[in-house]
Every structure is written in C-alpha cells, then in structure tokens.
Image (cartoon, rainbow, N blue to C red):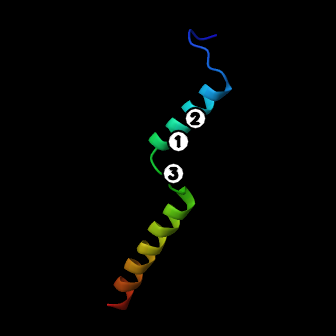
Amino acid sequence: MGKYQLDAKGKVAVTKFHEKQRPANFDKKQQLEKIRAEYLKKKQKQTDK
C-alpha cells in the first residue's frame, strides 16, 4: 500500500486531473488510413505523368 491513501472522492479527482492532462488520443487506424490515402494520391500522380 502507498503512503497516501485516497478515498473514492479523491480517486475521482485524480482521475479527472489526469484525463485533462493527457493529450488528445488519436485513433491509430484513422491515422494509418490518412497516411495511406496520401500515399495513394502521390502514387496516382506519378503514374499519370
């Protein structure tokens, strides 16, 4: 057990604090789709020339 023990109210406050401090979660699948789409556009432009 830790030195400082939190009651339920304290735990909620700590959780809220950490949620605000955490950077916005980015969706990994969405990020990959975006990169893939950009790659395909570049590839298409190269083949058009």
Q: Which residue is nearer to you in this view: 23 or 10?
A: 10
Q: Where is residue 34 in the image (x, y as percent from the top left)?
A: 47, 69
Sooner in the amino-acid sequence: mark 1 or mark 3: 1
Give the numbered dot on residue 2. none
Residue pointed to by mark 3: 25
> Are there few (<14), some (14-19), or many (20+) residues within 10 Å of tag 3?
few
Amino acid type assigned to the residue bearing label 1 in the image:
Glu
Looking at the image, is 9 positioned above or below residue 21? above
Depth order, front residue of 9/17 = 9
Q: Residue 15: which numbered mark, if any?
A: 2
Q: Name the residue under label 1.
A: 19
31, 12: nearer the viewer? 12
**Which of the image's four quarters has the C terminus?**
bottom left
Describe the element under mark 1 as helix, strand or loop: helix
**Nearest to N terminus: mark 3 or mark 2:** 2
Dot 2 alpha-carbon crowd within 10 angstroms: few under 14, some 14 to 19, many 20 or more? few
At numbered mark 3, what does the secondary structure look like: helix, strand or loop? loop
Q: In which quarter of the image is residue 45?
A: bottom left
x%, y% of residue 42?
A: 37, 78
Q: Which amino acid does label 2 sit on?
A: Thr
Numbered disc 2: secondary structure? helix
Please give the name of the residue rendered at 50% of the width and 36% of the height, measured from the top-left corner: 17
The amino acid pointed to by label 3 is: Asn
